[in-house]
Image (tube, grey):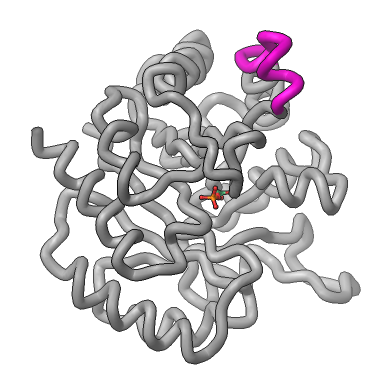
């Protein structure tokens, strides 16, 4: 049985005040939620403070990126060992904003996937097509090729206890969310693609949707059988909306 994972990606937002306040409110609102895994990925500078404020709650700590190196002369980087040391669990890699603004390639992202597995952290591998690729009917081909680089470099077993976040680029931060039934079809395709290598791995892999998820549309996504939670940007910056999204995921599990 797969538990949904609803994860907040704060991106480049936050402050000490926000870490303190937002986490306090979420702890309060989400204390009774049991059927959903929850994580928060603040900017790296606030990881330690967030861990402190999350202590004793059921909310896990996440991070937004990781370097491929474990130690050495790599100015400005943060390693998987450091993320583990600080208590982070779910690590986002391959977000389209990093692919776009930092020219991260599929191969480089697969290397990050490998280092997270070696460190026993959970990769949250972001994949998804651009608007032009979507219009050209290339959604499945793009998702398959982004997954294949990891499959070829590691093996299908690397997706054991891993998370995939399907985030169509055109739906990120735009308010234009994808149609839930169409997202379901993409998620089913992704699961079937992995099942061609190993069905047991495919059945347990968490496949989140991300892209303008909010309190109003979340429930419809979570009703779909292959949508296992969400990676939430903008709506995760408000306690009310993020809590409602988490509760919608937990509720869908119970129905
Ligand atoms: P929004 O929810 O703001 O569209 O962002 C989605 C996202 O990129 C999460 O990683």
Question: Residue at image x 52%, y 13%?
Answer: 193
Question: Residue at image x 71%, y 28%?
Answer: 130
Write down the region rendered in magenta.
Answer: 131-141
Question: Does 100 sit left or right of 192 as displayed?
Answer: right
The percent position of residue 244, horizontal first and vertical second, equals 25, 56
State the residue lying farthest toward the bottom: 17
Question: Does 208 sit left or right of 64 as displayed?
Answer: left
Q: Nearer the viewer, residue 27 or 206?
A: 27
Report the quarter where the N terminus lies: top left
Q: Is residue 198 at least partly visible in the picture?
A: no
In this view, 166 is above or below 117: above
Report the quarter where the C terminus lies: top left
The percent position of residue 42, horizontal first and vertical second, equals 54, 71
Question: Residue at image x 57%, y 48%?
Answer: 117
Question: Residue at image x 32%, y 50%?
Answer: 215
The percent position of residue 153, horizontal first and vertical second, equals 72, 29
In this view, 9 is above or below 197: below
The picture quadrant where one finds residue 67 is: bottom right
The percent position of residue 126, horizontal first and vertical second, equals 60, 40
Q: Main secondary structure of the magenta part?
A: helix
Q: Nearer the viewer, residue 192 or 231?
A: 231
In the image, residue 198 lies in the stretch drawn in magenta: no
In the image, residue 140 lies in the stretch drawn in magenta: yes
Q: Is residue 227 at least partly visible in the picture?
A: yes
């Amino acid at each position: 049985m797969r538990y949904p994972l609803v994860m907040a990606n704060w991106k480049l937002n936050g402050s000490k005040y926000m870490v303190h306040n937002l986490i306090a409110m979420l702890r309060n609102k989400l204390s009774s939620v049991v059927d959903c895994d929850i994580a928060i990925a603040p900017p790296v500078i606030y990881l330690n403070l967030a861990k402190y404020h999350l202590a004793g709650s059921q909310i896990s700590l996440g991070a937004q990126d990781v370097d491929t190196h474990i130690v050495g002369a790599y100015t400005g980087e943060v390693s998987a060992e450091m993320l583990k040391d600080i208590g982070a669990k779910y690590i986002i890699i391959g977000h389209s904003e990093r692919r776009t603004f930092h020219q991260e390639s599929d191969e480089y992202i697969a290397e990050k996937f490998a280092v997270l597995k070696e460190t026993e952290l959970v990769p949250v591998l972001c994949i998804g097509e651009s608007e032009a690729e979507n219009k050209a009917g290339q959604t499945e081909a793009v998702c398959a090729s982004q997954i294949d680089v990891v499959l070829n470099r590691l093996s299908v077993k690397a997706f054991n206890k891993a998370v995939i976040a399907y985030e169509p680029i055109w739906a990120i931060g735009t308010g234009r969310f994808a149609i839930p039934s169409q997202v379901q079809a993409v998620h089913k395709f992704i699961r079937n693609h992995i099942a061609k290598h190993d069905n047991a791995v495919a059945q347990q892999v968490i496949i989140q949707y991300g892209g303008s998820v909010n309190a109003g549309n979340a429930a419809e996504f979570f009703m779909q059988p292959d949508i296992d939670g969400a990676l939430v940007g903008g709506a995760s910056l408000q306690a009310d909306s993020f809590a409602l999204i988490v509760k919608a995921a937990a509720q869908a599990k119970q129905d």
